[in-house]
């Protein structure tokens, strides 16, 4: 929503000031300022003013640029003096996360939970994001973002050394991954625009689709090789035996997502406070076989990744602005709060557990059984099986963060930005699958020869519901579960934008 040169009195984008004085020509304001100054001098000369209360001229009018700051800015088109907007951006992002992995242990107090530190998880990601924004009509735009992951490195450092549950040896190093995760396509509409209607805030609604394009993630180890000669987990064979191969660990979550967001801001001279709300739902695409390997079985509790919601509040300080030259310097202070629901997810233990050779993880779990968690006989084609690829059910948690950014509109066609952020992820369980799905009622297959009601073989020894084939006793049973005892994430980014 830029304003072209010479549009200080443009009708379609009124200037943002509470008083109409902001639209006065500079010459009129200069004469007014001169008259006030001369009057004050005259009064002081004849002794009518007090030295303790000197006369002050009114603050000069603030002539603002015809667009909000980046949070609510939308490329426009078909305005009188601005027929088309096209923005091209290049952003480099670096993110580093570190946290402590714990495991439940026996406690001296009955019913009390006790956790023991077992590993330090660390991940470093470097990413290049290509962006395009194009105005369609007035304050309606379409946009596309293409994140290119330059490197994604993950590791587990042993705290106590040795082997964790699931026969995971630490330290453990994942292979360096790189490639394209998703392509993001969206549309943004500024329903109200303060720079067109000064008494209303700028209000933007955004809808974005994220589509997986890269190879889905596979559990891999950078060094360990299975007896079969590979270090990455392959699909399970027909007999239920896992296989391994030497190759790429993938880069994409293999999911599609829909994100809906609303943003609002209002300019008050040198300040522009803003707020936003976002919601995202994600579902498996190319990674579907890792979520439900045997299809959508009734017992599966979590078959999609967690839902995501985020609230954003902040304020932009604009200490300097030159409307005629299309120049502006701003400082952005932002706070965020995100909620991540329970779901099937890639935890910091994904690669380590997914490449484990522990039979308790590699053997499939039967959908139908007399006992919860019972392994299926190898080569049994009669019963559908739940396989394990490293994904685990994770507990709901929150992420709280802050961010500071500086942005410089150097000229009409060029803008630079730099940002740094710090966020904290709250403690939550990383292996959290329920043994039974209580939301599914057991159904009897019929009567036996004596007329007795046959039990539902999917119920096993569940008190209610049916067996969850994603449950693994060695990591999901209370007393053996893994937990992330909070994590800190530090982000850095640099952006250059060309505006046409």
Image: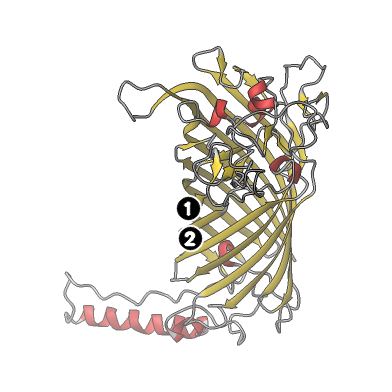
Q: Name the residue under label 1.
A: 336
Residue 245 in sight in this render:
yes
Q: In this view, does 88 lie above or below 8?
A: above
Quarter where residue 171 is shown: top right
Residue ID at (50%, 81%): 198
Residue located beneath label 2 in the image: 316
Q: Where is residue 146 in the image (x, y as percent from the top left)?
A: 75, 51
Q: In which quarter of the image is the C terminus?
A: bottom right
Residue located at (61% from left, 43% from top): 344
How far across and down, in percent of the image, does residue 309 sit? Answer: 53, 56
Q: In which quadrant is the N terminus drawn?
A: bottom right
So how many labels did they put on this image? 2
Query: Which residue appears farthest toward the front when viewing the image?
Result: 450
Q: Is residue 84 left or right of residue 321?
A: right
**Residue 231, percent across and down?**
77, 22
Between the residue at mark 2 and the residue at mark 1, the CA separation in whole angstroms equals: 15 Å
Observer able to see residue 131: no
Residue at 78% from the left image edge and 40% from the top image edge? 179
């Amino acid at each position: 929503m830029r304003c072209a040169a010479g549009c200080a009195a443009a009708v379609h984008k009124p200037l943002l000031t509470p008083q109409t004085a902001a639209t006065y020509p500079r010459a009129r304001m200069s004469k007014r300022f001169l008259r006030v100054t001369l009057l004050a001098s005259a009064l002081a000369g004849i002794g009518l003013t007090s030295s303790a209360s000197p006369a002050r001229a009114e603050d000069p009018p603030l002539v603002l640029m015809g667009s909000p700051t980046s949070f609510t800015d939308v490329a426009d088109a078909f305005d009188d003096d601005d027929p088309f907007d096209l923005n091209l951006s290049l952003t480099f992002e670096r993110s580093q996360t570190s946290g402590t992995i714990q495991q439940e242990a026996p406690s001296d107090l009955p019913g009390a939970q006790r956790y023991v530190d077992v590993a330090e998880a660390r991940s470093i990601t470097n990413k290049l994001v290509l962006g395009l924004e194009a105005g369609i009509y007035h304050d309606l735009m379409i946009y596309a973002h293409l994140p290119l992951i330059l490197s994604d490195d993950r590791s587990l450092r042993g705290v106590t050394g040795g082997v964790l549950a699931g026969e995971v040896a630490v330290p453990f190093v994942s292979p360096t991954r790189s490639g394209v995760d998703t392509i993001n396509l969206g549309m943004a509409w500024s329903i109200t625009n303060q720079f067109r209607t000064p008494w209303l805030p700028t209000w933007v609604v955004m809808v974005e689709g994220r589509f997986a394009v890269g190879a889905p993630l596979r559990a891999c180890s950078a060094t360990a090789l299975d007896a079969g000669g590979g270090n990455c987990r392959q699909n399970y064979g027909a007999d239920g035996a896992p296989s391994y191969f030497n190759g790429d660990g993938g880069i994409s979550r293999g999911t599609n997502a829909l994100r809906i967001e609303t943003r609002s801001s209002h300019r008050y001279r040198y300040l522009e406070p803003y707020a936003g709300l976002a919601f995202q739902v994600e579902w498996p695409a190319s990674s579907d076989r890792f979520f439900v390997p045997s299809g959508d079985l009734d017992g599966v509790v979590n078959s999609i990744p967690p839902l995501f919601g985020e609230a954003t509040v902040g304020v932009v300080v604009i200490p300097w602005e030159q409307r005629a030259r299309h120049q502006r310097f701003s400082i952005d202070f932002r706070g965020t709060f995100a909620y991540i629901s329970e779901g099937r997810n890639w935890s910091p233990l994904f690669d380590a557990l997914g490449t484990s050779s522990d039979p308790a993880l590699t053997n499939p779990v039967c959908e139908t059984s007399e006992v919860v968690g019972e392994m299926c006989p190898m080569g049994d084609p009669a019963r559908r099986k739940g396989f394990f690829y490293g994904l685990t059910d994770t507990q709901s948690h929150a992420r709280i963060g802050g961010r500071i950014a500086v942005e410089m509109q150097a000229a009409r066609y060029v803008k630079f930005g730099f940002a740094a952020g710090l966020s904290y992820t709250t403690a939550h369980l990383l292996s959290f699958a329920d043994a039974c799905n209580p939301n599914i009622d057991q159904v009897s297959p019929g009567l036996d020869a004596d007329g007795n009601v046959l039990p539902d073989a999917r119920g096993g020894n569940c008190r209610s519901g049916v067996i969850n084939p994603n449950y693994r006793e060695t990591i999901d049973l209370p007393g053996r579960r893994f937990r992330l005892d909070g994590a800190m994430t530090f982000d850095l980014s640099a952006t250059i934008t060309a505006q046409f």
